[in-house]
Image: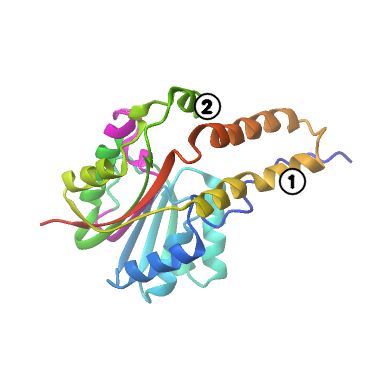
């Protein structure tokens, strides 16, 4: 009987971003120190960091928003196996214009686009719009963890051409500009940290690892040609485009006022 199973979705990733276990543990400790009663995860995926915060803060409840049904199902199953199902909801809905806040802790890591929707500006202007939305969603005295890309150095034209379609130098701030945008949106930066090279390599390899091993085992599968083209394009985008150019900042933000 022919094998018709599709490639697995991100089975080798714990976090959907360049985030190590060591950094995640520090983030959970720092964010949990304020004993948030409510946690809102924007573009949550399977909500790994949210679940870890809930595990560290007894009685806290969480809400994760995403539109990917498979990721949400993974999050619900992880919550069930950890005994957290009664304290968290994974909701299949857009975060653009959401009224789910305010929450004591808002997580938005690599998902600022989920807050702005198609009607908002792109690039660095969209980052500013996402930060304004986060300011509205966090409760007084709460915290926001904002994970966002930034340029470690200005990209060359050749590097931009190797990145995602339509990549532009205006897509991101540098780190100082990103922090400045957060301050302009009504936050003070309690903590500024950036992903290192090991975290990026772990994420980029893990992002494709399950699909690569599937392709090696199923070279003649009906989905193999299209999958191979997509994965080869992604890998080349990283290796010849944004590797060492695009960074990821994790900003712990405190709302002013």
Question: How far is mark 1 from mark 2, CA to CA?
Answer: 24 Å
Which residue is denoted by mark 1 in the rendering?
Answer: 213
Mark 1 neighbour density, 10 Å: few (under 14) some (14–19) many (20 or more): few
Residue farthest along the left direction in this orientation: 257
Mark 2 neighbour density, 10 Å: few (under 14) some (14–19) many (20 or more): some
Q: Residue at x 53, y 71 (%)?
A: 82
Q: Position of residue 212 (x, y in %)?
A: 71, 42
| Residue closest to the eye, 34 or 169 | 169
Q: Residue at x 77, y 30 (%)?
A: 222
Q: Residue at x 38, y 58 (%)?
A: 63
Q: Position of residue 202 (x, y in %)?
A: 57, 52
| Residue closest to the eye, 158 or 28 | 158
Quadrant housing residue 238 = top right
Q: Position of residue 136 (x, y in %)?
A: 21, 49
Residue interval drawn in magenta: 101-125
Q: Left or right of 13: which side holds 255? A: left
Q: Position of residue 52 (x, y in %)?
A: 45, 67
Q: Left or right of 130: which side holds 83? A: right
Q: Is residue 127 magenta?
A: no
Q: Is residue 110 visible?
A: no
| Residue closest to the eye, 111 or 194 | 194
Q: Is residue 246 visible?
A: yes
Q: Secondary structure at mark 1?
A: helix
Q: Secondary structure at mark 2?
A: helix
Q: Residue at x 26, y 60 (%)?
A: 143
Q: Is residue 104 magenta?
A: yes
Which residue is denoted by mark 2 in the rendering?
Answer: 162
Quadrant of the drawing holding the N terminus: top right
In the image, is residue 173 above or below residue 164?
A: below
Quadrant of the drawing holding the C terminus: bottom left
């Amino acid at each position: 009987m022919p094998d018709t199973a599709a490639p697995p979705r991100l089975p080798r990733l714990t976090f959907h971003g360049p985030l190590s276990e060591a950094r995640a543990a520090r983030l959970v400790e720092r964010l949990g120190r304020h004993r948030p009663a409510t946690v809102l995860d924007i573009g949550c995926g399977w909500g790994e960091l949210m679940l870890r915060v809930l595990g560290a803060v007894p009685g806290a409840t969480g809400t994760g928003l995403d539109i990917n049904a498979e990721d949400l199902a993974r999050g619900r199953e992880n919550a069930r196996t950890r005994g957290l199902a009664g304290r968290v909801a994974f909701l299949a809905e857009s975060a653009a214009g959401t009224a789910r806040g305010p929450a004591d802790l808002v997580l938005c890591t690599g998902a600022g686009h989920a807050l702005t929707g198609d009607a908002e500006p792109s690039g660095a202007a969209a980052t500013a719009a996402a930060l304004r939305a986060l300011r509205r969603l966090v409760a007084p005295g709460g915290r926001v963890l904002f994970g966002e890309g930034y340029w470690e150095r200005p990209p060359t034209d050749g590097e931009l051409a190797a990145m995602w379609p339509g990549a532009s130098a205006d897509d991101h701030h540098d780190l100082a500009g990103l922090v400045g945008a957060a301050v302009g949106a009504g936050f003070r930066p309690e903590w500024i940290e950036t992903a290192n090279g090991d975290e990026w390599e772990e994420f980029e390899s893990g992002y494709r690892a399950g699909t690569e091993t599937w392709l090696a085992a199923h070279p003649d599968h009906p989905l193999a040609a299209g999958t191979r083209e997509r994965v080869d394009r992604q890998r080349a985008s990283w290796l010849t485009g944004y590797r060492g150019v695009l960074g990821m900042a994790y900003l712990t933000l405190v709302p002013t006022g």
